[in-house]
Amino acid sequence: MLKPYRNTPDGRPILPPHQPLLWAAIAFAVGILLGSYVLRPALWWLIAAAWFVISGTHFVRRRIWAASALGLGALIAAGAFSIQVCPPAETGSRNILQFTDGREVIVTGHIVKEGMAHPGGLGATRRTVDVETELVDSDGTVFGVRSGLRLSLYAKDATDEDGQETAIIPPPLRYGARLRFPAKLFAPRNFGNPGAFDYREYLADHDIAVLGSAKVSRLEPLPGFSGNRLQLIRTRVHRRIVQTIHELWPPPQAALINAMVIGEDGFLGQDARLEFQRSGTYHVLVVSGMNVAILAFVVFWVLRRMHLSDIVATAIAVVLAVAYAFLTDVGAPVWRATLMLTLYLGARLLYRERSMLNAIGAAALGVLIVDPKALLGASFQLTFLCVLLLAAIGVPILERTSQPFLRGLRNLNSANYDWVLPPRVAQFRLDLRAVAGRFELLLGKRIPLLVIRTTAWIGLAGLELLFISAIMQIGLALPMAFYFHRATVVGLPANLLVVPLMEILMPAAALAVALGFISQLAAKIPALVAGITLEAITGGVHWLGTLRIADTRVPTPAMVTILLACVVLTLTMVLARRRALLAAAGLGLLCLSAFWIAAVPPKPQLHAGVMEVTAIDVGQGDSIFVVSPDGQTLLIDAGGTPLWMQSSLDIGENVVSPYLWSRGISHIDAVVITHAHNDHMGGMRAILANFRPRELWLGVEVSSPSLQAILQQARNAGVRITPHKAGDILAFGKMNVRVLAPSVDPLTLAWRRNDDSLAMKVAYGDTSALLEGDVEWQTEKQISQEQPQADLLKIGHHGSATSTIPELLAAVHPRFAVISVGARNVYGHPRREVLDRLRAANITTYRTDRDGAVTFYLDGHTVSPHLPALH
């Protein structure tokens, strides 16, 4: 006799929790991860998959559980095979790399992606566009090369008769336009540190193989059009939408609405991005699955209110979702969300809402079969996990708690309907009618019942939103810590505010833009609604983002923590469909896992009993990480970009911090600013915020506005600022520090440029390192007189010819040297004469532009170099 299905409190059956496609997708994903980290010949995985299939076929009628396990094994082997035979991202012909040696070439190509203009450096404005090359002319020889090129175009600002500069904005280059231009090409380069962002792979995913720069004045337009006509239509509509948004809203609001609605974030400022990141609501600034879902379900709801059939409403919602994904052109995340939405609506149409997990599994499996590398990206993981949290934890628990009561609010005035409902829901209806009855004499019979029903619906719906938001924040703790190093402490209240308002803003803004194509006047009302909603969102985000607790940063979780968090998440999904006590236990474990990730830092990856000196690869700048034998940490400089570059890249946030987090470091004991040049101190503000040091060492305090802003931030955070000068000797843990510079110029009593750098000798036992900062030959002569013998020399001023004089090398007599320098830098560092001096002195020299981060271990007797990026 078959066992009947259990029922929900309102009498609806709970179908057995079998989701074969979900388990298949998980097994395939496990195989992809296995194949990514366990390198074996692809044929091995193929043979293993075949063996599992044959064995499973043998057991299918005898031991169904064994056949199922073997089937999952076959999928694991298939996943490993798929990732190992997956071809690299197609960026066009690799032949273009032969032209990335610094020489100028003449490129003929056409625009494949238009770009926005933004400020550049040295009084210039630049525009970035993507070009597909057609021909490359090198020294009179023409090569046919089709490849992706990201091109930066520069236009020098003009000066009028009154001496005032006027920005010359590079002209817009439309999709399909052909042009010829001289340019210098170079291959994209990643920072050579563990934990560094894979910029090369990011560009490859966008079909870009090389980077280049050219002057606008040297562009030569060519006749003809090259491109896809459908893409041409898309870019024209996209451009018109952006223009309409700027016509309907003032610039600050237009920048946000462009990002939220159409995925155009070129107008966003860094401050706006940071506030949304700190509050845990950055997802609303990028077009994602949430945008697709909101628009599709609003359209579906309106069409159903118009009494259109389910089939027609579903078809229109899916078509509009596809059109929206096409117009935004933000890539795979939106298309994956559109696929999952289509499968869900299709399952709903077939009256199989409880097959949601199967539909999710089918969508995920399909995506992974087509593109196995998608699993390794944060975008896919976050999208899939969000949907899985909602479907596997949120919905099952709500189905047994609030949903029966929400459905019980239907036909509240019908006593006969009470008989078909579970007792507790019927009692809930009786109580509501009793409360409404007390006001009937004053307000009549209909109004009190309507008010009571509406109030109850808002209360229950609010509780559901609170619960779902909490599940999302807790469930996403692991990927947020792993990829973004953030514990979104204020994410729950922020999303409780932002998500409901987004459900108003998205349809209102979409309606305003659609009406704006017809009449600006007709679009005023929805534009006003969207503007008011946006002000509420930004006001709440700004207030929450300024709270100190919102800036909780966390290092990369340890592998054990990651595995345990995955186990807990899986267990919670299983228990969510069990009895209430087990479901509550699962939620408790999930909360404990999130708390552990946010509040319990992993053990730092340090070598006990040795002094460590690491030159972090920060490009053309300096950042030296020093660890004493007893684990005290000291960061000397934090890199940065020169002010004239006006780069939006924060070296402290995007380069130095990820390296430290990748080593499990959550706190630094002291930081040092050697001197007030931006390539040394530009990243320090992020370091102060992320690692909360106790002390800041300073050489010469100058009137630099950038330095004063850093010092004020340090004072506000309670950091002790300690000045140092030549002659100071101090202990830092088990390490001795001797300050050798700066010293006052005896002739001018002033500080010479770069010679105001803080230079230090750090020693442990019989081993030591001399860290020069940017000191030049005058100060090096003074240091040489101190006879500062050291095993390791950090070369001064990035290998400039003004430093590393023979007298210093003879006095220090180092075995090793390291140069912190940027690849292809405009200064020509390190200079050949400096390298020749080092070679003549038989000094083994490392360079961050070629070797990435370089670590030296000094154990008191010997020095051991190590290249972390190669391990």
Image (cartoon, grey):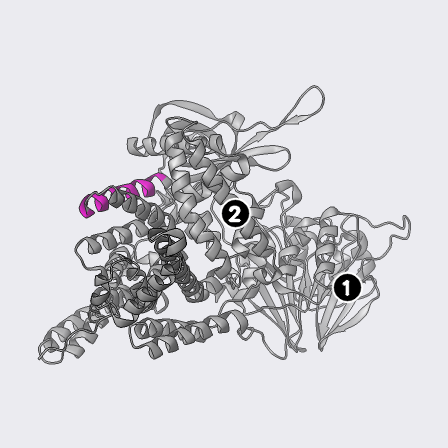
Tell me, yes or no, if residue 197 can be seen here: no
* Vertical position of residue 232 compared to residue 550: above or below: above
Q: Is residue 718 left or right of residue 193?
A: right
Q: Position of residue 75 (x, y in %)?
A: 23, 67
Q: Which mark is residue 536?
A: 2
Distance between the alpha carbons at the discs numbered 2 and 1: 65 Å
Most common secondary structure along the magenta stretch: helix
For numbered disc 2, what is the local secondary structure? helix
First-in-chain label (2 vs 1)? 2
Reading the image, the residue beneath label 1 is: 811
Q: Nearer the viewer, residue 101 or 651?
A: 651
- Dividing the picture into quadrants, the one containing residue 773 is bottom right
**Segment tinted magenta in the rendering:** 310-327
- Dividing the picture into quadrants, the one containing residue 779 is bottom right
Q: Tell me the kind of residue under disc 1.
A: Ala
Q: Is residue 314 magenta?
A: yes
